[in-house]
Amino acid sequence: MAKVRSVLLAAAVYWAVVFAFAFVLGIVRTLWLAPRLGELAATLCELPLVLTVSWLTAKRVTRGFGVNAPGEALATGLIAFTLLMLAELALARVLAGQSVGQWAAGLTTPAGMLGLAGQVGFALMPWWVRER
C-alpha cells in the first residue's frame, strides 16, 4: 500500500510541476508565438522546453518518492498523463468553449499531433529516467 501511495504522490507532483510550466508556456505560445510563427512552429518551439522540464522533474520525483521499479515508473507516467489529458480537456472547455469533439479534433492537426507526441513523451519520461 505504501508503494501505491508513493506512485500516486509522485504522479501528482510530476503532473503539477510540468503542467504549471507548460501552462505558462502555452499562454506565450498561444498569445505571442502562434500568431507570428504559426501553430506548428510555435509548438516546435515549446516542445523541447516542456520535455526538458519533464525529464528533470521525472528524475527528481522518481528518486524523491522511491519510484524504482519499471512498472512503478510506468504507472507514475500513465497517472500523470491521465491527469494531464483531463486538465487539457477542462481548459479547452472552460477557456475556449470547446466541446469534447472539438478538443479531440484539435489533436488531429499537425500541431495537435506534435503536442500529443510530446504528451506521450511526458507519460514515458518517469520510466525512461529510471531505466537510464
Image: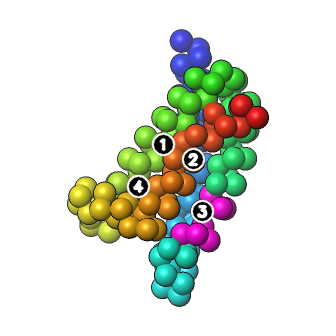
The amino acid beneath tag 4 is Glu
The answer for how far apart the CA atoms under marks 3 and 1 are is 16 Å
Discs 2, 3 touching: Cβ within 8 Å: no
Q: Using the rendered view, name the quadrant where residue 24 is placed.
A: bottom right
Q: Secondary structure at mark 2?
A: helix
Circle 2 is placed at which residue position?
122
Residue kind at label 2, given as amino acid type: Phe
Mark 3, mark 4: which one is toward the viewer?
A: 3
Q: Which mark is residue 88?
A: 4
Closer to the chain start, of discs 2 and 1, is 1
Q: Residue at x 63, y 24 (%)?
A: 70
Which image quarter holds the N terminus?
top right
User: Is 45 part of what is drawn in magenta?
Assistant: yes
Q: Which mark is residue 47?
A: 3
Image marks 1 and 4: residues in contact by CB distance under 8 Å: no
Task: Determine the CA span between mark 4 and mark 2.
Answer: 14 Å
Residues in magenta?
A: 43-50
Q: CA distance from mark 2 to mark 1?
A: 7 Å
Crowding at mark 4 (Cα within 10 Å: few <14, some 14-19, many 20+) = some
- Mark 2 neighbour class, 10 Å CA radius: few under 14, some 14 to 19, many 20 or more: many
User: Which residue type carries mark 3?
Assistant: Leu
Overall secondary structure of the magenta section: helix
Q: Residue at x 76, y 34 (%)?
A: 132
Residue in the image at 30% along x and 62% along y: 105
Would you name the residue on which mark 1 appears? 81
